[in-house]
């Protein structure tokens, strides 16, 4: 089982949802402005920020190797969302989520997993000629027959 960036995922997902909700106002305003000026569609940006952050959160959970890349994207979109007033709180969460994704260190998970069992090497004990195993933990050869290190 591989380690997941759970905290970064949860925060990013929450921030994406908050920005999405916050963007409703801007999307409606943008639609209204687009009707008169044509440029109102620019206000749809917040809607896309929310959607992309949600995708990023899910992607980093599905494929933890992409966590750092999505961390940058989510952090940047969080910064942009700060100016949206209704999306500001979601933006703050996205920045924290993105920063956590960037700081996420999967190598920590490797150190907590138990070491693999000693492998059969086909090596033999010099005194009793029984099969010996290499114990990774102690970095020594162990003779099962005599129950001692050789
Ligand atoms: Zn032996």
Image (cartoon, grey):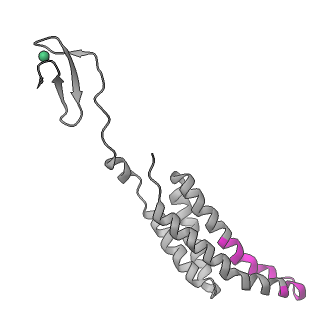
Tell me how many marks there are.
0
Residues 60 and 145: in front is: 145
Residue drawn where x is 84% and y is 87% of the image: 32
Magenta stretch contains residue 47: yes
Residue drawn where x is 69% and y is 80% of the image: 23
Residue 12 locus on image (x, y percent)? 55, 69
Q: Quadrant of residue 34?
A: bottom right
> 66 above or below 97?
above
Q: Is residue 69 left or right of residue 113?
A: right
Q: Is residue 18 left or right of residue 140?
A: right
Query: Which quadrant would the C terminus be assigned to in this image?
Result: top left
Q: Is residue 143 left or right of residue 48?
A: left
Magenta stretch contains residue 38: yes
Query: Farthest residue toward the right?
Result: 36
The stretch in magenta equals 32-50
Residue drawn where x is 13% and y is 13% of the image: 126
> 107 above or below 122?
below
> Ligand 1 shows up in which quadrant of the image?
top left
Residue 115 locus on image (x, y percent)? 30, 39
> 96 above or below 7?
below
Residues 21 and 41: in front is: 21
Residue 82 locus on image (x, y percent)? 59, 83
Residue drawn where x is 28% and y is 16% of the image: 122
Magenta span main SS: helix
Query: Which quadrant would the N terminus be assigned to in this image?
Result: top left
Q: Is residue 4 left or right of residue 38?
A: left
């Amino acid at each position: 089982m591989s380690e997941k960036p759970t905290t970064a995922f949860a925060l990013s997902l929450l921030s994406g949802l908050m920005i999405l909700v916050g963007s409703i106002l801007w999307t409606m305003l943008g639609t209204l402005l687009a009707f008169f000026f044509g440029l109102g569609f620019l206000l749809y940006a917040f809607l896309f920020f929310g959607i992309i952050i949600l995708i990023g959160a899910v992607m980093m959970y599905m494929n933890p190797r992409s966590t750092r890349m999505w961390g940058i994207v989510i952090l940047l979109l969080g910064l942009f969302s700060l100016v949206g007033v209704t999306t500001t709180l979601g933006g703050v969460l996205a920045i924290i989520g993105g920063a956590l994704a960037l700081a996420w260190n999967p190598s920590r998970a490797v150190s907590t997993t138990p070491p693999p069992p000693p492998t059969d090497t086909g090596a033999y004990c010099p005194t009793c000629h029984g099969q010996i195993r290499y114990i990774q933990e102690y970095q020594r050869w162990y003779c099962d027959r005599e129950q001692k290190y050789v």
